[in-house]
Image: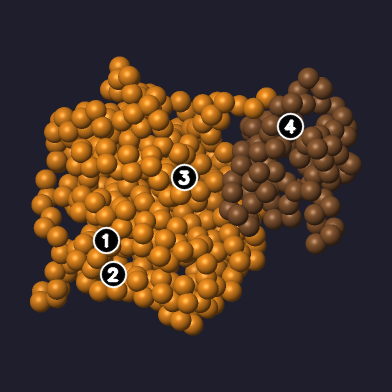
Chain colours: A orange, B brown
Amino acid sequence: MSATPSQLVDQLKGGLDAPICLTWELTYACNLECVHCLSSSGRRDPRELSTDEAKAVLDELHDLQVFYINIGGGEPMIRRDFFELLEYSIGRGIGVKFSTNGAFIDSEKARRLAAMDYLDIQISLDGTDAVTNDAVRGEGSYDTAIRAMEHLRDAGFGEFKISVVVTRHNVDQLDEFKALADSFGAQLRITRLRPSGRGADSWHDLHPTQPQQRQIYEWLLAHGENVLTGDSFFHLNALGEEPLPGLNMCGAGRVVCLIDPIGDVYACPFVIHDEFKAGSVRDAGGFSQVWKHSELFAELREPQSAGACASCGSYDACQGGCMAAKFFVGIPLDGPDPECVGGHGEAAMLAASAAERPRPMMDHSKPVRVGSPTRVPVSISRR
Amino acid sequence: MSLLDRHLELDAQVAVRPEPFGALAYHYGNRKLIFLKHPDVVRVVQALAEHETLADTLAACEIDEARWPSFERALSALTESEMLHERHAVATR
């Protein structure tokens, strides 16, 4: 009677009655301008969901028995109704994990957060020193994040999370990230860099090299049970016999989705593009209608073709990798992942002409002003 | 004591959401998510509180005795993740 893991994965691929992992970007407004921002955040969108609209979505998620949501942005704490929505969600039995750069967590807010149940906090940090971190996240952002962690620790919040996007420049710091998390009694979470949002431009210079991919895989095998990954490294499973912990499947539109700040529903947080937009919570029938009946999600829940990867012996292990990563570098969705550990990604990227590469949509980046500090502190070449 | 003789119940912090394959169980306290991979497991778990022991529950749910060992395995995983606990533990708390 107990299904094997592969049977379970097959069932999950067919879609669930409601998402397991729902990300909700509350605002496109952000005090930072990280070069790899998945949602190209910066400026608030005037069409942002109102407090009442957001509460109506939470009511729906309650009815769908969504256990918890991942709140992000932008910087979600910028919203003036942030605590109101947080309390409303938790009051409706929907646990919250929110991602923040920490700029708005002072000692008073930390105490307020520490007093709440069913709340997890993720502080983003992309380097264990200011030079490495600030090159990606902007000047002063390392100190800001560390200060927020100190406030949470001093307020007795308990085990918060430190969330790291692994890049070419911080991959050698994985042990140090773990030690930093341990020193705060925090949990480390590492995720994959994707060429989404502003990452479309920075990915080529920041994504880990092939030898570094193996380094990540081996590091995760050694530490995987204690480190969260959001299941983001399943493309690395082709590197060895032993799979990384997790379901190791693409959950887009099947167990995962994204609600953006203006209520549009996308297949996952990494594909903010019309091609992966399933509908809007503002449409008749709301979120449930989109989740249950959108054409896009129905298609994603059909068995997917292995395409160009069908003849590769590793397909069962890597599942062809990440849909979003392929899409934004111009590789067909049934082609190899750009970071295919078998090396098939390079050729596929070369075959895709730069002109055909889809551009991310919904760019809310702040305009670059003459005389202002350069927005992008690492050298970025458009290819 | 065999799991079959124990007095189990769903932790008050656990929510069970029906799905086509069975159900999802989520523990709000320890944030664990478990897949209940058969509708019969879901029925049994939800009926636990109405019966004295796991064996009584399985019998009441008309589960064939040949399948009991697999239910023991599934439910012991649920006790390890603290989704299920002994009823007495609560009474004496």
Q: Which chain does the residue under circle 2 lie in?
A: A
Q: Amino acid at mark 1?
A: Gly
Label 4, label 1: how far apart the Cα atoms are: 46 Å
Q: At which x and y percent is residue A119?
A: 55, 64
Residue toward you, A365 or A99? A99
Q: Are marks 2 and 1 in contact (CB under 8 Å)?
A: yes
Question: Can you tell which mark lies on residue B72?
Answer: 4
Q: Residue drawn at (74%, 26%), measured in percent from left and top?
A: B69
Q: Three-letter amino acid code at disc 4?
A: Glu
Mark 3 neighbour density, 10 Å: few (under 14) some (14–19) many (20 or more): few
Tell me which residue sits at (42%, 44%) in the image: A224
In the image, which disc is placed on residue A127? 1
Does residue A205 appear left or right of residue A238 in this picture? left
**Residue pointed to by mark 3:** A225
Q: Earlier in the sequence, mark 2 or mark 3?
A: 2
Residue A212 against residue A22 in the figure, above or below: above
- Image coordinates of residue A230 in percent, x first then y, are 43, 47
Both marks 2 and 3 on one chain: yes
The image's mark for residue A62 is none
Type of residue at label 2?
Answer: Tyr
- Residue found at the very far top of the displayed protein: A311
Label 3 amino acid? Glu
